[in-house]
């Protein structure tokens, strides 16, 4: 069978098409939610949540982001190698070697222990006149990085402000349950951080205070402070796991494969390892050359849909490393070469990353972060 002549792209075994125009528009919409003087920091860690960090960083800046955030020093260095300018915040824990990488990239770093701040000062002392920008992190209830002791945070801020090789740039925290509407932990964290931020501002004017992730940005304007750190939302993913359109966000990523083979199945015949699906009636089955070697998880066995010619078709049989099988029904017009959409829209149908996440009992951005390097990223602009 021949491929469809009207297909907009030649068939590819596994490709993620990323619309950087959607990322730019999402950033603009998020900026519109912010008050005067509040900046947008676009989080592009983990290769831009699987979307491509450099491309996404540029799109976010075009959409009004004035800061970028990453988790590692290497991620900051990668952005700089590709000519990305502007402020970069490295939010994660750093070894002594990674401190040098972060400072060489001109990035801000985060501290919650005096020993780390002194190590940053020692690294900065190598460069005449350098004052490394440091953000002090208060743990108000996430229970991960950051000091949970306000007094330790006060003393650390004073130490950083007094050191000739350091500059106290910011104060931050991170919310544990901002995406759980109606909980009482988020308001408690916000109240504790707000009170502490007021105190630190009085002692250290000019601090950039920031706390809000995507969920907090959409949920509570009081959490915006001087800057918000949006990750998932800039990619058009809903931090609440529902429909991003409810917040005016556009999903940027479409995951595609193609129909590589079509086979006739009679009742009782099976597809895939372990014979976990058997035809109950005569049917046609399409084979798509994508699998868990591309990040399409094995837990989606008999547990996902695929769009082919604008129609939802059930994934049947075990997801293997390189292939999946899709039930086309007893009669079909599908042909070899037809595009297959695993995440995205086709015709009048769509499959959101949020739907895939619910089937996997996980979150939408684990789905996009989990797409492996074998999936080619194709960046385009709409």
Image: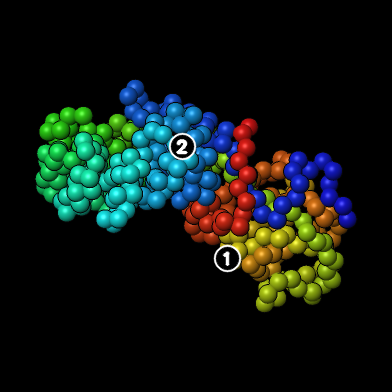
Label 2 crowding class (10 Å Cα cut-off): few <14, some 14-19, many 20+? Answer: few
- The residue sitting at the top extreme is 36
Between tags 1 and 2, which lies in front? 2
Q: Is there any visible trace of residue 150 in the rendered image? A: no
Residue at image location 22% in from the left, 33% down from the top: 207
Which of pointers 1 and 2 lies earlier in the amino acid sequence?
2
CA gap between label 1 and label 2 equals: 39 Å
Viewed as shown, does residue 213 lie left or right of 17?
left
Residue at image location 41% in from the left, 48% down from the top: 75
Viewed as shown, does residue 32 lie left or right of 284?
left
Q: As rendered, which of 313 and 211 lies closer to the eye?
A: 211
Q: Secondary structure at mark 1?
A: helix
Residue 282 screen position, x and y as percent? 84, 67
Q: Is there any visible trace of residue 158 in the rendered image? A: yes
What residue did someone put label 1 on? 299
Residue at image location 76% in from the left, 46% down from the top: 10
- The residue sitting at the bottom extreme is 274
Q: Secondary structure at mark 2?
A: loop
Residue 186 screen position, x and y as percent? 30, 45
Residue 366 screen position, x and y as percent? 49, 54
Residue 199 screen position, x and y as percent? 14, 35
On screen, residue 180 above or below 286 = above
Which image quadrant: the C terminus? top right
Q: As rendered, which of 345 and 73 lies closer to the eye?
A: 73
Instruction: Determine which of the numbered discs, if any, sits on residue 83 in the image.
Output: 2
């Amino acid at each position: 069978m021949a491929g469809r002549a009207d297909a907009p792209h030649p068939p590819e075994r596994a490709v993620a098409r990323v619309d950087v125009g959607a990322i730019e528009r999402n950033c603009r919409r998020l900026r519109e939610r912010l008050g005067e003087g509040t900046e947008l920091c676009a989080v592009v860690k983990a290769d831009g949540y699987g979307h491509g960090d450099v491309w996404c960083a540029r799109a976010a800046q075009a959409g009004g982001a004035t800061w970028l955030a990453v988790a590692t020093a290497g991620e900051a260095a990668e952005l700089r190698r590709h000519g990305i300018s502007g402020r970069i915040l490295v939010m994660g824990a750093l070894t002594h070697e990674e401190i040098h990488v972060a400072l060489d990239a001109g990035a801000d770093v985060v501290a919650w222990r005096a020993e780390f701040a002194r190590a940053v000062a020692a690294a900065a002392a190598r460069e005449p006149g350098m004052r490394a920008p440091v953000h002090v992190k208060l743990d108000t209830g996430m229970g991960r990085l950051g000091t949970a002791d306000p007094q330790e945070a006060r003393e650390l801020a004073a130490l950083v402000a007094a050191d000739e090789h350091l500059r106290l740039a910011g104060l931050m925290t991170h919310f544990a349950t901002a995406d759980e509407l109606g909980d009482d932990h988020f308001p408690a964290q916000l109240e504790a951080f707000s009170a502490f931020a007021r105190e630190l501002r009085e002692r250290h004017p000019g601090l950039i205070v920031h706390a809000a992730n995507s969920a907090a940005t959409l949920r509570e304007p009081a959490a915006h402070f001087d800057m918000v750190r949006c990750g998932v939302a800039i990619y058009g993913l809903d931090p609440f796991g529902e429909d991003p359109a409810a917040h005016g966000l556009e999903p940027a990523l479409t995951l595609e494969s193609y129909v590589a083979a079509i086979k006739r199945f009679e009742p009782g015949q099976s597809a895939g390892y372990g014979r976990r699906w058997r035809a109950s009636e005569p049917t046609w089955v399409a084979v798509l050359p994508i699998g868990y070697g591309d990040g399409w998880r094995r837990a989606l066995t008999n547990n996902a849909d695929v769009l082919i010619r604008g129609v939802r078709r059930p994934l049947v049989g075990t997801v293997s490393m390189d292939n999946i099988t899709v039930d086309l029904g007893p009669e079909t017009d599908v042909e070899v070469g037809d595009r297959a959409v695993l995440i995205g829209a086709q015709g009048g149908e769509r499959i959101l990353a949020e739907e895939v996440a619910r089937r996997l009992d996980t979150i939408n951005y684990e789905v996009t972060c989990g797409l492996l390097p074998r999936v080619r990223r194709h960046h385009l602009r709409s």
